[in-house]
Amino acid sequence: MTLQTDLVGLLGPERVLSSDLDRFLYGKDAGVYRGEVTVVALPETTDEVQEIVRIAARHDVPVIPRGAGTGLAGGAVPLGGGVIVATTRMNQIFEIDAANRCAWVGPGVINLDLSRAAAPYGLHFAPDPSSQSACTIGGNVANNSGGPHCLAEGSTVNHVLGLEVVLADGEVLVTGGKAPDPVGLDLRGIIVGSEGTLGIVTKALVRLTPNPPDVRTLLITFDSVEDAAATVSGIIAAGLVPAALEMMDQRMTEAVENWLHAGLPTDAAAILLAEVTGDTPAVEAEADVIRQVARGHRAREIRVARDEAERTLLWKGRKSAFGAVAQAAPDYYLHDTVVPRTKLVETMREVYEIGERYGLTMMNVFHAGDGNLHPLMMFDASEPGALDRVHAAADELVELCVRNGGVLSGEHGIGKEKRDLMHLMFTPVDLDAQARLKEVFDPDGRFNPEKILPAGSRCFDFGRPVPEGAWI
Amino acid sequence: MSIADAFASFPRAPGELAAVVPPTELVLAPGDVEETAAILETASDLRARVLVWGGGTHQGIGHRVEPDVVISTAALDRIVAWEPDDLTLVVEGGVTVAAVEAMLAERGQTAALPEWGGPATVGGVVAAAISGYRRHRYGPTRDRLLEATIVTGDGRVVRGGGRVVKNVTGYDIPRLVAGSFGSLGVIVSVCFKLWPLAERRATVTVDDAERALQTLFRPVAVLETRDGVSVYLAGTEAEVQSEAERVDGVATEGFAWPDPPQGETVWSLRVPPALVSEGIGRLPADWVFVAEHGVGHLRCAGRFDAAAVAELRGWAEEAGGALVLEHAEDQSVYERLDPWGTPPSGMALQRRLMAAFDPAHILAPGRLPGGR
Ligand SMILES: Cc1cc2nc3c(=O)[nH]c(=O)nc-3n(C[C@H](O)[C@H](O)[C@H](O)COP(=O)(O)OP(=O)(O)OC[C@H]3O[C@@H](n4cnc5c(N)ncnc54)[C@H](O)[C@@H]3O)c2cc1C
C-alpha cells in the first residue's frame, strides 16, 4: 500500500490532496520559503490525526502540521517532503464555558471566529494577531502568537489552560484543564510555541478575557521616530502598561493611508497608537499619563478616538498595514525581533542605517510597547540578488537586536527562517538541552523536521555514559 | 570514599538555614554557577540523591525524598540586573521574596510574588510554581517568568528564554522549570517581568464574592476566609474609589492580606474557578482556608481526616482539579495517601523529560507525581 492509498483509505479521496496545484499551494506559508509537499491530509477528528501519524510512521515520512498557513517563519513549510496535516476542518468550538471564562476549541478555529462566538458572553480571546481573521488557534498555540493587545494580556501561552495533543507514537496526551496549576511537569508551556515540532494540537482549552467596560484609543503624532520611541520607553518607565502601544513610521503610514483612508497623518515622521482599557476613571487617568509623556517628547498632535467607529478605523489601519504594503511593492520581507524597551530609540536608529547600507526601503509598524520590532523590507524578487541582500540585512538586524539585549523573535517563531541564528542567543549546551527535549517527544524526528533547532544541536555530550538501570 | 568526603571541598551552608531543617547533615551552599555545576557533576557520578533547598517553606509538597546531599541556594543571593524602565528583573535563585519585593517597592514596582513569601526564595517559588494572591490581576508566577538558568542533574548549565517581555525563541524551558520541584535542575537565576505598583491600594469587605467578581473589571483579588470576603483594589485614586462604591463595601487603605492557613495538614485545592464557593462548602467544618475567587485555588488547613480528604479529593479530581498536600506535621500522612492524588496522563513522557535533564536520576528522585 502506498502512503496515498493508506490516507485515502482513512479519509476518502476528497480529504487527501495531491494534485500539482494543491502541492504547490501547500508548499509555502506567508513567508518567503517554499518546500516540497508529498501529500495533504485534511482530518476532522483526533482519531483521524492519530491514524495519519501512524500511517506516516509506517511509511517513514515527516508530518507537518498546518493551520491557515499565515506563518511568516516557514514553520508550516515542509523541508523534506511529507504529509501536511492541515487542520482547516477541525474548526469546531466545542464549548464556551462563560462561568469559567474559557473555551474548548478545535485547532482549525479561526482566531477572530472565537472572539465573535464569545462576544455574547462579554468575553474575547485576548491574543489578536493582525492576521486574526485568517490564522487558526492551532497556529497561534504552535507559534505562541502575539498581537497588539498582548502588551497587557500576554501572548498566547498566557491564555492556554489545556491541550489535547497527538504525539509521535500516535497516542493522545491531554494536559492541563480548567483548574489552575496541573500537577506534574507543566507540559502546556513546552508545547505552546513548539511550532509543530513536538506534536499536533487537536484541541485547545483557552482562556477567555472579559471585554473591558471602557476604552480610550489615542493617536499621537511625532516629527521624529526617536521622539515616538522615547515616548514608548517613557510610558513604560512611568509605570503604565497600556492595553496596546503600537508604532508606525511615515512610510508605513503613507502606505496604509493610500489604501484605506483611515485618516492617519501622512506628514508625521511617526505615529503611536495607544490604547488603555478598564473602568472610566482608570482609562481617563491613564490617558492623561500618556498625554503628558508624549508632550514631554514633543508630540505634535494627540487625538482621542471619539467613538467606536473611529477606534475601529484606527485599528483597521494598524492591522491592515501588511496588506497595504503588499499593494505598494512586489515583495516584502517582514522581520520580527525584540529589544528591551529601554533600547528602542538607539535600535530604531540602527535599523534605518542597515536599510540604507543595503539599499533597501525599511518600513516599520510594530508592537512598540513590548519592544517587539517588525522592520519590513521592500524588494523586487525578480531583481537578481535582491533576496540575498534582504537575507543579509535581516541577519544583521537580528544581530543588532541580540547585541542590544534582545531576542531573535517575539511572536513569529523561529521555523526555518531563524534556525541558523539560534547560536546568537544560545550556547551549544543550551541548544543541546532543547534538542534533547525535542528527542523526548519525537525520537524519530517525525514532526516538522529541520525547524527551530540548527543541524547538529544534539551534539553536546558530557561524555559520561549513564550506567544500566540508573534510570528506571 | 564516603559521600561526605567526596563533597568535602565544597562550601557548607553556614549554621541556621531556615525554620525548616533539611533532612540531612550534608548541606552544601555553592556560591556560583560553576560551583553548583561541579557539585552536581560529582553527585551524578556518585549517584548521590540531591534535594535543592531554598527557604525551606515549600518542602512539604510532594513525595518525601531522602537526600544524601542538600544543595542550599542561600549563597546564590545576588541581584543580577534590574531594569526599572523596562520592568524586568534578573536575580539569582537564592534571593528571598522579601528582599526582592522590598527592593522593587522602593521604585514602585513588584514581581507579584507571594505576599506571604518572606523567607521563600525566588528559586523555590518558581520550582514550586507558587503564585501569590494577586494572581487574578497579574497572572500566575509562570506567566511572569521570562528566563531561567538551571544547572541540570549532570552539571550542565542551561539557559532558556530571554530578558525581554516577549519572546518565542526556542523551546520554553523556563515554563517547564516552573513547577518542576527541583527535578530538572537547580535554578540558579531567573528573569521576571515586573508590574508597576498602583498609586492607591485598598481592601474592601463585601458580602458576596461572586457579585464582586461580576461587577468589577479585574480586581487584584477576591479572597474569602472564615472571616468573610475581601476585595483588593488597585489603581488611581478615582478608580479605586469608584470601584469600592460599586461593590458597596467598607474600604480600608492598603492591602490587608490574610495569613496563610495553618494546621496539622495544609492543602492546595485546585478547581475550575466557578466551583470555588462549592469547594468552600465541602471543606471540613473545622478547617481554615483562603479561597481565591476567580482563580480556582483554595489553600486550606486543619486536622487530618482520611475519609474527609478522600471525599474532597474525589470531588476535585472529578471536576478536573486536584487536592495537593502541602504540609503535614505527622510525616506518616505522606505514607497514608498520595500527596498529589491521581497522577496526570503522560507519565512516561514526564519521566523521559526528567531523564533528559537529569540522566542519573539524582534530583529529588520520586518527588513528583507518579514517583512512588
Ligand atoms: C498579514 C499578517 C499579519 C500577521 N500578524 C501577526 C501578529 O500580529 N502577531 C503574530 O504573532 N503573528 C502574526 N502573523 C503570523 C501568523 O499569522 C501567526 O504566526 C499565526 O498564529 C499562524 O497561524 P496559522 O494558522 O496560519 O498557522 P500556520 O502558518 O499554518 O502554521 C504555523 C506553525 O504552527 C504549526 N501548527 C499549525 N497548526 C498546528 C497544530 N494544530 N498543532 C501543532 N502545530 C501546528 C505549523 O507547523 C507551523 O509551524 C501575521 C501574519 C500575516 C501574514
Image: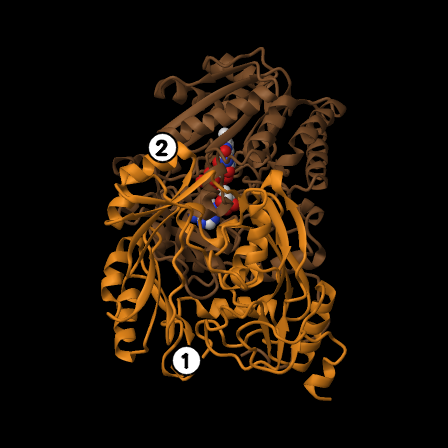
Secondary structure of the residue carrying numbered label 2: loop
| Count of all numbered marks drawn on residues in the image | 2
| Residue B118 against residue A411 in the figure, above or below | below
Q: Which residue is mark 1?
A: B334
Give the x, y percent position of residue A447. Answer: 52, 54
Q: Is residue A115 left or right of residue A315?
A: left
Secondary structure of the residue carrying numbered label 1: helix
Q: CA distance from mark 1 to mark 2?
A: 47 Å
Residue type at mark 1?
A: Tyr
Chain assigned orange = B
Q: Which residue is mark 2?
A: A279
How crowded pointer 1 is (Cα within 10 Å; few <14, some 14-19, many 20+) is rated as some
Which residue is at 63% across, 67% downward? B73
| Residue B231 against residue A179 in the figure, above or below | above
Q: Is residue B46 left or right of residue B351?
A: right
Chain assigned brown = A
Q: Residue furthest bottom?
A: B1
